[in-house]
Image (cartoon, coloured by chain):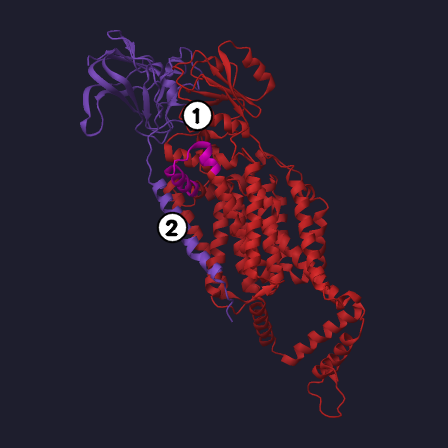
Chain colours: A red, B purple
Amino acid sequence: MTEHEREGASGREGGERPTGDAARADLSARALAKADPTPREVVSAWWRRVRAAFAAWGPDWRAWRAAAAADRVRRSVRARDRVAGLPVWGWLLLATAVALGVRLYYFFVQAGIHYPDEMMQYLEPAQVRMHGFGWLPWEFNGGVRNWILPGYYGGLMELGEALGLRGYTLHSALVLHNALLTLLLVPAGYRLGRAVGRGDERLGILAAFAMAAFPPFAYFAPHTLSEVHGLLFTTWAYALWAEQVAFPDEFGRDRKAFLVGLLLGAAFLCRYTLVIFIPLVALDYNFRSRFRELGWLAVGLGVAMAVLGVVDAATWGRPFHSLIGYFQYNVLKDGSAEHGIMPRWFYWNEAFVGRLGFARWLLLGPMVLTFWRHWRMILAWVIPFAAMTAIKHKEERFLLSIWPFVLVGALSGMLVLADALRHVGEWKKRRWFGPVRHAAVACLLAAVCVWAFVGTRKLPMRWLGGVFAAQSWVGQQPDATGLLLDERQHLNGGYMIMNRNIPLLQYNATIVQHRIYNYVAVHDEKLIRTMEGKPEFRVVGQFEDVMVFRRTDGLVGGGERAGERTSGRAVER
Amino acid sequence: MRLRWSRLGRAGWPLLGLYLAVVGAATAVFAGRRPVPETSRYSVPAPLPGVRTNFAALSGGAVLRVSSFDWFHSHHPLYAIDEQAKPDKTEKWATVQKDRAPWIEIELAVRVDVDEIDLVLAGAFEAKEFTNRDFVVRCLRDQGAGETVVAKREVSGNEDPRPKVPLACPGTNRVRIEFLVEPIGKSRDVARVYEVSVWGKPAAP
């Protein structure tokens, strides 16, 4: 009698014919013992095994579920030591090294901005608060933004200036800081993947590498955008929530639920639209009758809201002033549409088709084919995707927070399909088949990353980089009394980059005659020719495509550096 | 059953705490700042002795401090000393509405025997009802604990968009003008100054 047959014979005593569940278990054991079962036989055998296990534990499904959870934890603890010859912490260190390399690449390759908000919504307000001069957009005139992220960056700027950093070098330090901060995605991805895989360390490690190498994360990382912080908060929140789903009797569930609420609340404070990530978690707690965790989730959210109330009261004079203003402008008046209405399928066309190309099917295919294993991850990105699609004003960065769940769901599907191959064909007997299956999944992930890298290159890499460099250089000139740019007021580095309290305006043919504007930085070819034709101006610098002109009859003298001419790319990092 | 964490994983929490503590302390310093906007100091030639000059000019090396300025509309304080004869409407110093006690202080490059302070107010280029009516001009010497008010003149009910305030201030190095503004929503709820001139001769050493 084989081992399988002995297992299937539970409850059978000498000469009895097995009936009911025992019979089914017998059949499944016989099916697996066959040399080459068909896929249908594999599925049938699996289903019979599940039913037999369920029956063995009896009708108390809660006890069965608790036992299954404990079994998962035991498997996780046992598997903790090594995966493919390397300890888990070794894999995570390797993933962190990959993440660091990718992020440093994007840090050095990029210059300027991805979107004006990263300067004018966060750094410039901090600059105004610190030094008393700057330019702020309409949101800070009307109180539609809170001061939490500007305050955070203000703290970082205090540290930077204490170390002697100013202007463009301070900005470079801040974006490098953000890039390094996103390394926290690696452990978050590991915990999320391991939880989704019910203790499967392989999925955790693959998810860690996905967070490390996925180019859109690394592209957006060296930018002072609220979406970067929102991404970190939502990923960690969902990782902790997924652990609670996978290991429901885990110690510290109240603390975890509180942290989930606090992190989701923090994401909300960074970007109010990230509120869309909260309902799924709350509903899940509710439907699983985890009312205690639901309560702690609410407490965590409440703490975040209390912080917002205090900050708004201190800065705008009224608790929740910015949230009310945001709601009135964006929801009641649909004001966001004034900033551009995008087609309905913008997110699909840009984020999936444009960025991933064919690789989108490498992600979506396995995810959908094995949806029952990770349906929470599917909802985690489909719900925000649908909600964002309903809003008329769309920008690709708004969708940044969904990518961890797309990747983990896809990797989960890939592993399920790879594991299913164990029962198919002659290869399952080969020792190398296991490593080959896992390598195939890793290769698929690598292919997705390579495709996304190609797609990400279509995003602006050095938008306004020359303007930033020109502003920074002019700000260092001792005789600078005014600067004109051929960009609108919000499309430049602001006073934070210029680090000089002088008028900064958009060029026009009238005001350029006034002597207070003794520096002009333009990149439009027609304007460059116009400026070259003015005898009172001469070229003193070039930064990428931006030419800098200096007035020879300015209001103040030249100073020691006024006669220099400089050229080169935007500040080399 | 508890999930075991490696030492490396457990070390993350104290590191995170340290990071939050440092950034939190720096943010507290940031939140406590009350900066006064100040313009840059420029190197200029020394004034000719005995020659009456406008010392509150950018070309004279004056430095400005203001209580506020309307950054949203780019009404930078430097416009008040740019000696622009026909400025654009943007090219004036204007304060923000929530600044209920607007002032501008001109730090002169050298000590001056001031004899007159001239202003060009909004009515010179805009509607007359925007002209600030009430202001106080103070001549100051030195700063901080050693500060001395050399002379002071209060102006009330001014309708002249280009008021000239004769004020003898020997040995002055700072001139401060404080405006009394009307309630928010009125025509004169902010200060609007196109030009400030401080006339005098360099003080004897």
- Classify residue A281 as left or right of residue A44: left
Instruction: Please tell me in which quadrant of the rendered image residue A373 appears.
Output: bottom right
Instruction: Please tell me in which quadrant of the rendered image residue A416 appears.
Output: bottom right
- Classify residue A155 as left or right of residue B146: right
Q: Nearer the viewer, residue B58 or B132?
A: B58
Q: Is residue A375 visible?
A: yes
Which residue is tagged 2?
Answer: B21
Q: Which quarter of the rendering shows the N terminus of chain A?
A: bottom right
Residue A405 on image: x %, y %:
61, 53
Q: CA distance from mark 1 to mark 2?
A: 33 Å
Residue extending furthest toward the top: B51
Q: Which residues are magenta?
A: A151-172
Is residue A169 part of the magenta span, yes or no?
yes
Residue extending furthest toward the bottom: A14
Residue A245 on image: x %, y %:
56, 64
Which residue is tagged 1?
Answer: A475
- CA neighbours of label 2 inside 10 A, class few (<14), some (14 to 19), many (20+): few
Secondary element at image label 1: helix
Q: Is residue A58 visible?
A: no
Identity of the amino acid at label 1?
Gly
